[in-house]
Image: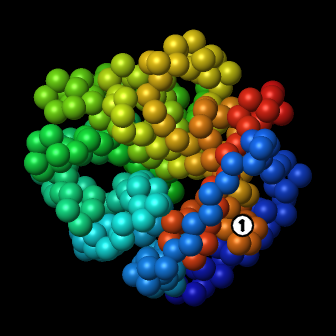
Amino acid sequence: MGEMRVKAIKSWDKLLTWTLSPKNQPYHLASPLDQKVFQVKTPELFQFDENYGYFSIYHPIVGIVTDATRDIEVTNCVLKTLPPSEDHNFTQDEILAKVMAYRPLKKGMKIQISEKETYIIDAVIDLWHGMPAFGLVPEKKGSGTPLLLYRGTDLNLTSEKGWASILSDLDTTGTGHTTYLRARKEIRAWLEKMKKNEKPARVIGFSLGGVFVIYTLIYEYDLLNMDAKSVAFNPPGISDEVLDEWKALPEKKRPPHVVYVNQGDFVSQIGLLLTNVWELTLDHPMGVIESHVTLISVQPLFKMTAVDVPLENQSRE
C-alpha cells in the first residue's frame, strides 16, 4: 500500500511539474549572491525522513494530519536529537511547522522543542470549523519565547476541518485571508495574554500556516516578539492591498522574520512576497509536489539563497 501511494504521488508530481513548468519561473536572486550551504550528517535525521517523511512507504507524517498520539512522541524524539549546529534553529522550526503542527495536540500536553526545552500547549485556537492553531508556552516561565504554531493545509476530505482548510486555500481575496480575519479576535487575545503574562510570542507556520504567519506579522505586529524571529515556510504570496499595509509600517515596528520558499514550489509563486525571503534548494531539481512537502533540513545537502524581493514582486505584477 505504501509503495503504491508513493508511486502514484511521484507520477502525479511529474505530470504537475511538466504542466506548470511554463508558469513556474526561477526566483530573482539577490546580487551579489548571498548564499549559505549546509551539510547534514546526523543519521537520526536521515532515518526520520525515511520512516516518516512525506514520501515514506512506512508511516508518512510530514505535512499529513494523523490522530495517533504516538506520532507526537516520534516528533518529540527527533526534536530532542537535533545536534548543536549552524542550522539548528532552522531545523527545529521546520520540524515544528511541517510535523508537530499536524499532530493531535491538546491543551495541557507537553512537547519537546529541544533536548532541554519543554513547552506546554496553552491553547488550541479554532480558526474556522476546527482548523487549529496551537499556542505554546515554556514549561519554566520566562525560559523561552511563547510560540503560536499554525497548521498548514489539511487535505483530509472526510473531515470538516479538512474542507475548511481547502476552502481557505481557494479564498479569492487571498489565500487564507478571510479565515484569518474571522479568527483574528481569538488570535489577538492569545497574543495579548502572552505579552502581558509571559513575553511577546513569535509565530511559525508552513504552507497555509505560512501565510497565516505573514498575516499575523502585518496585523498583530504590535504584539509579536521583536528579538526572536517568526518563520514562514512555503507560504503562498499575498495581495497588493495586504502588502501595502506592511509597507506602510515603519521598519522599526516590523517584527523580525524570515520567509523560506523552495525551488520548484508553485504554491509560493502565487501572489506577492513579504521581505527577507530565502530560496531553499537541494542538489537536484525538485518537482512541484516534492518541493512543497520535502523536509529540507534533513536532506544531506541544502542551500539557502537570498531572493531579490522587489525585483521578484515586480516580475509578478
Q: Is residue 11 above or below residue 107?
A: below
- Residue in the picture at 15% in, 40% down: 142
Q: Quadrant of residue 102?
A: bottom left
Percent coordinates x, y for residue 4 in the rendering: 60, 85
Scheme of colours in the image: rainbow
Nearer to me, 75 or 138: 138
- Residue in the picture at 62% in, 57% down: 36
Q: Is residue 218 above or below residue 171?
A: above
Q: Quadrant of the C terminus?
A: top right
Q: Quadrant of residue 311?
A: top right
Q: Is residue 253 above or below residue 88?
A: above
Crowd tier of the residue under label 1, counting other residues whose Cα lies within 10 Å: few below 14, some 14–19, many 20 or above = some
Side (left or right) of 172 relative to 161:
right
Side (left or right) of 101 relative to 261:
left
Number of marks in picture:
1
Q: Which residue is mark 1?
A: 286
Percent coordinates x, y for residue 119 in the rendering: 19, 52
Percent coordinates x, y for residue 286 in the rendering: 72, 67
* Any part of residue 34 in sight: yes
* Any part of residue 59 in sight: no
Three-letter amino acid code at the position of disc 1: Met
Side (left or right) of 113 relative to 110:
right
- Residue in the picture at 51% in, 33% down: 214
Q: Residue furthest front?
A: 32
Q: Residue furthest right?
A: 22
- Residue in the picture at 42% in, 39% down: 229
Q: Quadrant of residue 100?
A: bottom left
| Secondary element type, mark 1 | loop
Side (left or right) of 240 relative to 84:
right
Nearer to me, 45 or 208: 45
Nearer to me, 298 or 288: 298
